[in-house]
Image: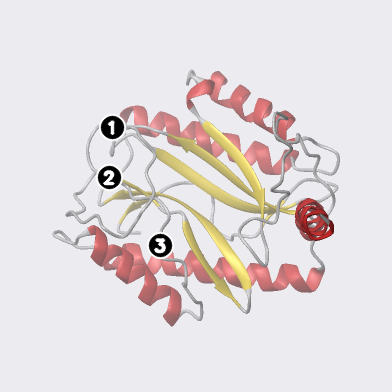
Amino acid sequence: MGSRQSRAARTHAYGPLLFARQQKTEAELQLLRQAMEINERAIQKTVATWDKGMTWRELNFAYYKAAVATGGIVDDPRGNVFSNPRGVDPAIMLNMGLEDFVIEPGVQVLFDCHGYWNMYCWDGGKTWIVDEQLSGTSAEVAHATTAAIAELVQAMRPGVRVSQLQAKIRGVYKGFGIDPESVHIYFHGMGLSHSDLEQYVEEGKPYPDWALESNMVVATHLLYPGSDRQRYWVEDVVVVRPDGGESLYSWDFNPITGKG
């Protein structure tokens, strides 16, 4: 009985420790900025390697090589988390490393990349419209998402709750005439792991509506599901500040078009 109680106590304490890990020191923030820079440069280099006939596996391999060449390590079995399947099915699928297909012009590739540098993780990315520019519904979704994530970053201040952020984002989409309930919006902390966030929730209870605290590092996710030419995605990594959030990425929130 004693050993079972000890295990339970350790399990219950693990979540609060992860929550505490969300707050970073300035030294840790410098490590995270470097990690995000590696990911940002690796994605840009990967896009630049694309040519007609390139396959999904070749694209993933190009990302692995670019990340390592830029100083990072990819030990996750999927450097790019989403599988980016072809066709009209809007299902969100993860990359299990078994798929392969030619990446056609006009397809919208969702980069959600994992790796680490000096033990600190990178996460995130955005949408690439392969060898083309945005048009039609995709352009409307992109404009709405760019506006939503810019407003989101400004709203990420101490004391603000996740539910308030979600409501704000949905309001932006609604203002653009896009069904706000169709957009997936979620958050997690990150640093030494991709889940610096309390994991344990007592059975039957909703996940905590946690409040942001100063110097927390939070990964923000906005995903509009759709066909391979409609889906859209941005994942930013933000430091919570008293006067508004600070993105750890240097690029803007617009999509990558053409060949970068």
**Whether label 2 touches label 1, CB < 8 Å:** yes
Identity of the residue drawn at 60% across and 39% down:
186
Q: Three-letter amino acid code at disc 1?
A: Asp
Residue 42 picture quarter: bottom left
Residue 48 picture quarter: bottom left
Q: Three-letter amino acid code at disc 2?
A: Pro
Mark sitting on residue 78? 3
Q: Would you place residue 217 above or below residue 154 in this image?
A: below
Which residue is the site of mark 2?
85
Mark sitting on residue 182? none
Mark sitting on residue 89? 1
- The answer to which of 33 and 223 lies nearer the viewer is 223
Q: CA distance from mark 1 to mark 3?
A: 21 Å
Give the structural element (helix, strand or loop) at label 3: loop
Identity of the residue drawn at 71% across and 46% down:
200
**Whether label 1 touches label 3, CB < 8 Å:** no
